[in-house]
Amino acid sequence: MVKPKLLYIGTFTGNWVSDQFRETGFKRHFDVRIFDYRAYSKTDYMNMNNELFKAVYEFGPDLIFVNKGEVISPMIIKRVKSIFPNCKVFIFNGDQRGRIQDETVRLGSVSDAILINNNHDEQWSQYYDAGVKKIYEYHTATDANTFKNVKVDKKFDVVFAGGHYGTRFPLSKFRHQCLVGLSKNFKLGIAGGRNWTSFSGMEYVGPKYRGSLTGFLNSGRCILGINAFNDIKNYTSNRTWVSMSTGVPYVCHTYAGINNFFKHKQNILVFKTVDQCIETVRWVLKNQPEARKIGMAGRTLVKSKHSYYNRSEQLLEIWKEVKDEA
């Protein structure tokens, strides 16, 4: 069976998310070519969009999947659509925030659909009002063969992979408060973020990803998860899938729609307040066998429903739907 042609426009220079989307997901269902728009824009921004059109013209894709694409011109999308009317264009942004994203509106208004990692009615209405034609809920994912359960020394009681972004996000202060509280009660490790070294009692580890992130996450008896905001329904960061994929118990701050994905004390441990965060970690340490079962149940869940293969399969179905409606 001939696979549909997919042109994946993103950034691939050392970006493991993009690489895993392509290698463990999209290649299963599509004939994939890539165009690294950021690599072009760094050296020859003026010519980047022309090179993009050239890549489209030479490949003749059935679907163009744009990951972010903040420097891509909407005029190029219009030009592609006029010459290749059967080619569908989807705009994906896995970094949705508490407000609509300008680049998603700019490109989405001239594309066939946008794919966003939430199901928030108010935000979707804002996108439709801005001219977006069609929206699908579409999340990031994990590769369970990279982010897996491995035997390493349990150096920490709890680990956290993330940064401190000051006032940029609503929950930055809450994240800080939780980490300060945890650092006073447990052995805490932090990796992959920024600005934590200024807080006393916090050991900074990283930032490193791929195998080293897998090892770091496994070095904790549990993993802490706190989104930058929690009032956008179904918004789930890539960190959630990656962390739970390791099988280490995941202690997660609640967010709108969390029950649509997980069940407390079955495959995740949920808290609301700083005190609950501390008590939940304490419970994990005192109930290791049960906590480990919860962690492995979380791994089983994300491996079966939130892999890059799952997302590729979903993308194929969305493409078929949009194509058939045309």
Image (cartoon, rainbow, N blue to C red):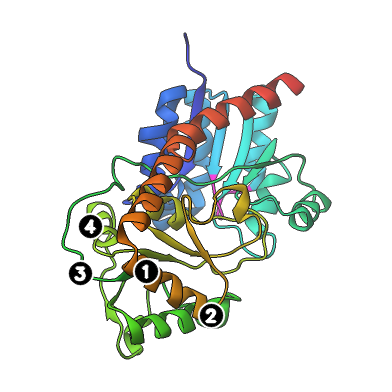
Q: For the residue marked with disc 4, what is the amino acid? A: Gly
- Secondary structure, mark 1, is strand
Q: For the residue marked with disc 3, what is the amino acid? A: Lys
Report the magenta stretch's main SS: loop
- Secondary structure, mark 2, is helix
Q: Mark 4 or 1 closer to N-term?
A: 1
Q: Residue at x 31, y 48 (%)?
A: 147
User: Separation of disc 4 and disc 3 at Cα?
Assistant: 11 Å
Q: Name the residue under label 1.
A: 160
Q: Mark 2 points at which residue?
A: 174
User: In the image, is residue 148 above or below residue 56?
Assistant: below
Q: Is 56 in the magenta?
A: no
Q: For the residue marked with disc 2, what is the amino acid? A: Phe
Span colored in magenta: 67-73
Q: Residue at x 41, y 59 (%)?
A: 250
Q: Mark 3 points at which residue?
A: 155
Contact flag, marks 4 and 3 (Cβ < 8 Å): no
Q: Mark 2 or 1 closer to N-term?
A: 1
Left or right of 132? Residue 255 is left
Front residue (pair 234, 124)? 234
Front residue (pair 291, 5)? 291
Q: Residue 215 carries which label?
A: 4
